[in-house]
Image (tube, helix red, strand yellow):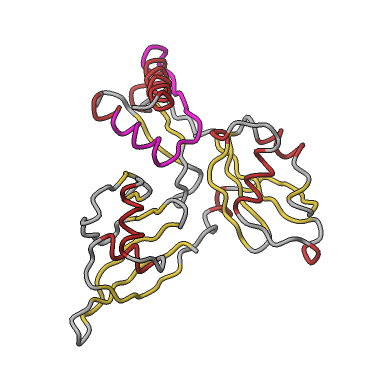
Amino acid sequence: MEKEDLLLLKHLSDLAEKSYRNNMFTFSGFLSLTQQDILAGLLKEHPYMHASLFGGNDACERKMVRFGNSEELGYEEAFPIVCIHIKPLIEKFADTFTHRDFLGAIMNLGIERDTVGDIFLKEKTAYVYCQEKIAPYIMNELDQVKHTHISCETVSGEETQLVKEPVSKEIIVSSTRIDGVVAKVYHLSRSQSIELFRAKRVFVNGRTQENNSYFVKPQDSITVRGFGKFDFLGEVYHTKKDRLCIAIAKYE
């Protein structure tokens, strides 16, 4: 395990210990999928640890971990997550934005990466999940993305649940083997798809999937770092040439 991973493991262990010792909820920053794998290993070794994950809405991949159990502690505490809606001051003159444009503008404020969760784009606006403590600073200091002047406002949970709706699609594959499905979804060759597994860039239900011969199951959620995310909905029919039509929900 690399030094960075060992430091994260110690930090998570300390948060769990603090929660247990002081009878209080403790929270991490936002964890990537790879970091959530490290957390899963810790919880497997220490099943007595009570932990839950949340990123702001059900579609989020980057998530905080909360240590503590409301039944044992006798109270409930919400995740300290705020969603900021970033939008151009004058939309018709706004640049065309990418996820990287918004993330870069926020990181240029000098804050830590783990204070910011997922960023969802909707037309020329973005919904940014962040730690509650850093939200006022972002809203006060962020006034421009690329060449476009912007405004920031916090939005409620009900509004953010509407962000990032997947698009249902049907595709033809030879089987439900994951390397073939990933290749088809993202228009890759089989060798390119296999390389993604070797590089540990494929996740199934939030866990690293290195076995490229795994057969996907209905309701599996597959994330390919650098490409996107899709849910496998199931088989639809077999073609006359005995190929398989499957249904997916792809997050565009």
Does 26 appear in magenta? yes
Instruction: Indicate the position of residue 78 as horizontal and vertical percent values.
Output: 49, 34
Q: Residue at x 23, y 62 (%)?
A: 177
Instruction: Indicate the position of residue 108 as horizontal and vertical percent values.
Output: 69, 38
Q: Is residue 44 above or below residue 126?
A: above
In terms of depth relative to the viewer, which is nearer, 70 or 203? 203
Q: Residue at x 71, y 35 (%)?
A: 109
- Which contiguous range is marked in magenta? 20-41
Q: Is residue 215 above or below residue 58?
A: below
Instruction: Indicate the position of residue 205 as horizontal and vertical percent values.
Output: 32, 49
In terms of depth relative to the viewer, which is nearer, 43 or 175? 175
Instruction: Indicate the position of residue 92 as horizontal and vertical percent values.
Output: 79, 67
Q: Quarter-wise, where is residue 82 in the image?
A: top right
In the displayed image of the protein, which residue is found farthest to the left? Answer: 242
Does 37 appear in magenta? yes
Left or right: 214 as drawn, with respect to 32: left
Q: How many marks?
A: 0
In the displayed image of the protein, which residue is found farthest to the top? Answer: 21
In terms of depth relative to the viewer, which is nearer, 58 or 23? 58
